[in-house]
Image (cartoon, helix red, strand yellow):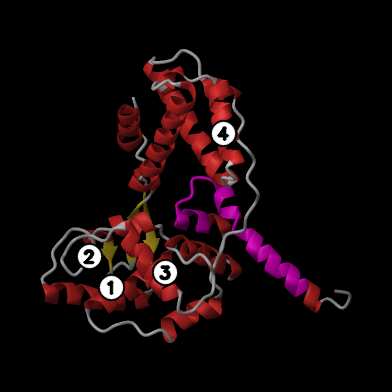
């Protein structure tokens, strides 16, 4: 049933490979708990008290509330699938309430540090340096996700129209404008690919011509951000947060930012306005005569 469930998520729900790995891990952890605690190898036979006891155990083990919430979401989707397939007649997750997660503001790199990244950090000569710089420039200039930059095809990067076509979550396509300076970096990178004879439909490649993978993109971002910021998190998603925060700080319309980020709901974009609000509070306090 787990394999059928994952196929459903992959082909019908269009979940990303990264999300599929998380769902598989969550489901397998729950199955292991059922086997060890209740001596059953069939998750479809689990009851609400069994599920509740697993979540209670996770909380006792000091697992972060957000992680428990995600695991509950996995089970919620899994049991809806079983109900749809006729494997179960009642959904045990209907009686389960996930813990509330504390509100966290998105972590982002400040503007001076981002400026230092592109003006003071030295990138290596040759293919790797041109590729890595373009990756970082594109993350900050467009706010795209790591999975989106990995799946970007050569044909998706239109330097003449100054746009990139991105395949986002649930296989939704969107067109993102790029700044003219990115055209120059993209042309230099393509020239290096041609010089090395690298041929692949994917835009970003290793020196052996194979597409980049998740951990490699993460390593590239962490390496260069480590030169300019002391933030604990130095990931591609931090650059996505940075793009959204900075563009909103500079007066961008929130609905336009929503479209650029590929958010399904405005509420997902509004989280970035909290950083802007905090900045306004500081300015108000510092500038007002009675502050």
Q: Which residue is mark 3?
A: 222
Q: In whole angstroms, how far apart are the C-alphas of marks 2 and 1?
A: 8 Å
28 w.r.t. 284: above or below: above
Counting every numbered tag in the picture gives 4
Cβ atoms at labels 1 and 4 below 8 Å apart: no
In this rendering, the label closer to the viewer, 3 or 2: 3
Residue 165 in sight here = no
Q: Which residue is mark 2?
A: 205
Q: Nearer the viewer, mark 1 or mark 4?
A: 4
Secondary structure mostly seen in the magenta stretch: helix
Earlier sequence position, callout 3 versus callout 2: 2
Mark 3 or mark 4: whose residue is earlier in sequence: 4
The mark nearer the N terminus, 1 or 3, is 1
Instruction: Evaluate if marks 3 and 2 touch, with contact meaning CB atoms under 8 Å apart.
Output: no
Where is residue 79? Give x, y as percent.
45, 24
- Where's residue 99, x and y in %? 63, 38
Query: Which is more N-terminal, label 4 or label 2?
Result: 4
Determine whether, in the image, residue 267 is placed left or right of residue 212.
right
Q: Which residue is mark 4?
A: 55
In contact (CB < 8 Å): disc 2 and disc 1:
yes
Q: Residue at x 68, y 69 (%)?
A: 279
- Magenta residues (range): 256-284
Residue at disc 4, secondary structure? helix
Say which quadrant the N terminus sits in. Answer: top left
């Amino acid at each position: 049933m787990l394999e059928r469930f994952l196929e459903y998520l992959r082909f019908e729900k269009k979940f990303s490979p990264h999300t599929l790995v998380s769902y598989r891990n969550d489901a397998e952890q729950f199955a292991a708990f059922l086997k060890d605690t209740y001596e059953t190898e069939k998750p479809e036979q689990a009851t609400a008290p069994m599920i509740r006891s697993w979540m209670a155990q996770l909380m006792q083990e000091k697992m972060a509330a957000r992680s428990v919430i995600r695991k509950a979401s996995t089970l919620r989707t899994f049991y809806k699938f079983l109900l749809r397939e006729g494997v179960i007649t009642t959904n045990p997750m209907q009686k389960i309430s996930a813990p509330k997660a504390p509100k966290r503001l998105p972590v982002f790199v400040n503007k001076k540090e981002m400026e230092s990244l592109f003006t003071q950090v030295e990138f290596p000569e040759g293919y790797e340096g041109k590729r890595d710089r373009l990756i970082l420039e594109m993350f900050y200039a467009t706010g795209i996700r790591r999975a989106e930059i990995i799946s970007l095809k050569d044909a998706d990067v239109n330097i003449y129209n100054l746009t990139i076509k991105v395949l986002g979550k649930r296989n939704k396509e969107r067109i993102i404008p790029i700044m003219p300076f990115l055209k120059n970096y993209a042309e230099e990178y393509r020239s290096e690919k041609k010089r090395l004879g690298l041929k692949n439909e994917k835009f970003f490649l290793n020196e052996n011509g194979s597409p980049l993978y998740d951990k490699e993109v993460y390593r590239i971002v962490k390496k260069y951000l480590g030169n300019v910021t002391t933030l604990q998190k130095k990931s591609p998603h931090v650059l996505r947060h940075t793009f959204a925060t900075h563009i909103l700080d500079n007066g961008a319309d929130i609905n336009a930012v929503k479209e650029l980020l590929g958010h399904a709901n405005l509420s997902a974009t509004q989280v970035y306005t909290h950083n802007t609000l905090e900045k306004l509070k500081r300015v108000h306090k510092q500038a007002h005569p009675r502050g």
